[in-house]
Amino acid sequence: MPDWRRRLPHPALVLVVVIWGLNFSVIKVVLGYLEPSVAALARYLLMLPILFGIAALLRVDLKYPKGQRWRYVFAGFVANGLYMVFFLEGMRTAGAAQGAIVLATAPVWIGLFAILAGQERSTPRLVIGGLVAFSGAVIVIVGGGAAIEGSTTGALLVLISAIVWAWSVILMRPLVASGSPFGVFTLTFPGGLLALLPYGIVPLVKTDWSAIPLYGWLAFGYLVLVAGIGGFSMYYKGLADVGPAKTGVVQFFIPPTAALFAWAAFGESLTWVQILGMAVVVAGTMVASAAATSSRSNTSPSE
C-alpha cells in the first residue's frame, strides 16, 4: 500500500479539492432557497442516519473508547456544529470565490493551533507565513470595490469559520490516529446537534419545503451526500494518513477551483485587488505549511 505520508497528492485529497471547490457554488444555490440555519440543521438531520447506516453496512466499530465519549462529542460540536454556523452565515453574503479564498487561511490557523497543542514546533517561517496569509485574506475581504457591506461581513464570518475549522482539525487529529477516519467522523457527528438544534429548529419548522424546485433539491443533495459525507470522510482519511500540515495543502487549490466553478455557474469574477489577495493568501499559506511540515519531520521522524 502506498506510503502517502511521504508523498503527495493523496488521491482522497485530490477529490476533496474538486468536491469542495464546486461546493461553494452549490451552497450559493442552496442559500437561494433556504436560510443558512435551515440548510445547516436539515443537512445535519439527513446526514446523521445516512452516516450510521453506511457504518452498519461497512461493519465499522462505533463504540466510543472508554472514558472518551465527551471528547468525541466536543470535537463534533466544534467541527460539525460551530463551524457550519459561521460558515453558512458567512456564505449568505460572501461570494463563492471570495469565501473559498478566505477559508484558504485555515492551514495557517491549523499550524498555529498545532503549536499551542504541542503537535508542531514554532518556527519564524510559520509566523511570517501566517501573517502574510492573514494579510491576503484582509485584502480579499476589503478589496471588492463596490461590494456591499454584507459581503465584507460575510467574508469575516467565513474567516471565523476557518479558525474554528482549524481548531476542530487539532481536536480530530488524535482521534483519527487511533481509529478509522469514517468511524471517528461518525462518532463525533452527534456532537454537532448541540450547536445546530438551537440555531435552526424554529426556522426549520416554518420553512415551506414545497416551494423548493428540483434544481434546489439537487444542490441540497450534493451538499449532504457529496460535500458532506464524501468530502469530510476523504478529508479525515487524508488527515489520518499524512497529518494536519500536509492535509492543509489542499486549501491551496480550492480557491482557484472555486473561482473557476463560480465563473462558470454565475459569471462571478474577482477584482484585481482580490486576485492579488488570493496570491498573497496562497503564498503565505504555502510558507506556513512548509514550515509546519519541516517542524513535524524534525520532531516526529517516525510519522
Image (cartoon, helix red, strand yellow):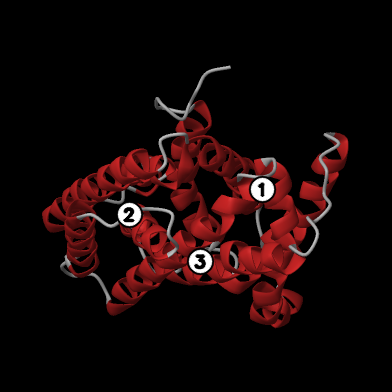
Residue drawn at the location 29% of the way across and 73% of the way down: 152
Q: Which residue is mark 1?
A: 221
Residue 171 appears in the rendering: yes
Decide: few, some or many residues near mark 3? Use Cα within 10 Å; few <14, some 14-19, many ≥20.
Answer: many
- Quarter of the image holding residue 138? bottom left
Q: Which residue is mark 2?
A: 121
Label 1 to label 2, Cα distance in Å?
Answer: 41 Å
Residue drawn at the location 48% of the way across and 61% of the way down: 165
- In front of the other: label 3 or label 2? 2
Q: Which residue is mark 3?
A: 88
Horizontal and vertical percent position of residue 21: 43, 43
Q: Secondary structure at mark 3?
A: helix
- Quarter of the image holding residue 122? bottom left
Horizontal and vertical percent position of residue 239: 52, 42
Tell me: 222 left or right of 93. right
**148 up-or-down from 299: above or below:** below
Residue 210 appears in the rendering: no
Q: Secondary structure at mark 2?
A: loop
Decide: few, some or many residues near mark 1? Use Cα within 10 Å; few <14, some 14-19, many ≥20.
Answer: some
